Amino acid sequence: MTRDLPEDYTDCVPHWMRMLAEGRGDEIARELVDRFMSPPGTGTVRRHAPVSRLLYRQFAERSTEEVRRDVEHNRQLLTHDWCVPEPVPAVPALV
């Protein structure tokens, strides 16, 4: 989980909402793969091409309703005070 959202990510949600309304699901899937794959220079992703194809297929095969819910979820994350700057408790956690 990130403490901060990249500024360009906040611009993606309205863009994805427009694309969804226009029925451009394949393009949304491509953008999501680009967004969620490790950016160049941040480390090596073993078998990058197969992982990208798998992610694309998973995003592309989602129903319009599933994509709509995902986009709405991201919209809510951006409009909700979801990260309260408090100390993280020192407890065991499984992530």
Image (spheres, grey):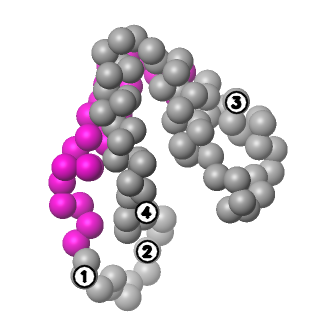
SS category of the residue bearing label 2: loop
Residue 71 percent location from the top left of the image: 33, 33
74 falls in the magenta region: yes
Label 3 neighbourhood size at 10 Å, few (<14), some (14-19), many (20+)? few
Residue 29 in view here: yes
Report the front residue among 32 and 47.
32
Residue 86: name its quadrant: bottom left
CA gap, disc 4 and disc 2: 13 Å
Q: Residue at x 26, y 67 (%)?
A: 83
- The residue to which callout 4 is attached is 1
- Mark linked to residue 93: 2
> In the image, which residues are magenta?
58-84
SS category of the residue bearing label 1: loop
- Mark linked to residue 53: 3
Residue 58 in view here: no
SS category of the residue bearing label 4: loop
- The residue to which callout 1 is attached is 86
CA gap, disc 4 and disc 3: 24 Å
- Mark positioned earlier in the residue sequence (4 or 2): 4
Q: Given this view, does label 1 or label 2 mark the residue nearer the observer? A: 1
Q: Which residue is drawn at 61% across and 24% down?
A: 57
Residue 1 percent location from the top left of the image: 43, 63
Q: In this view, does 23 lie above or below 11?
A: above
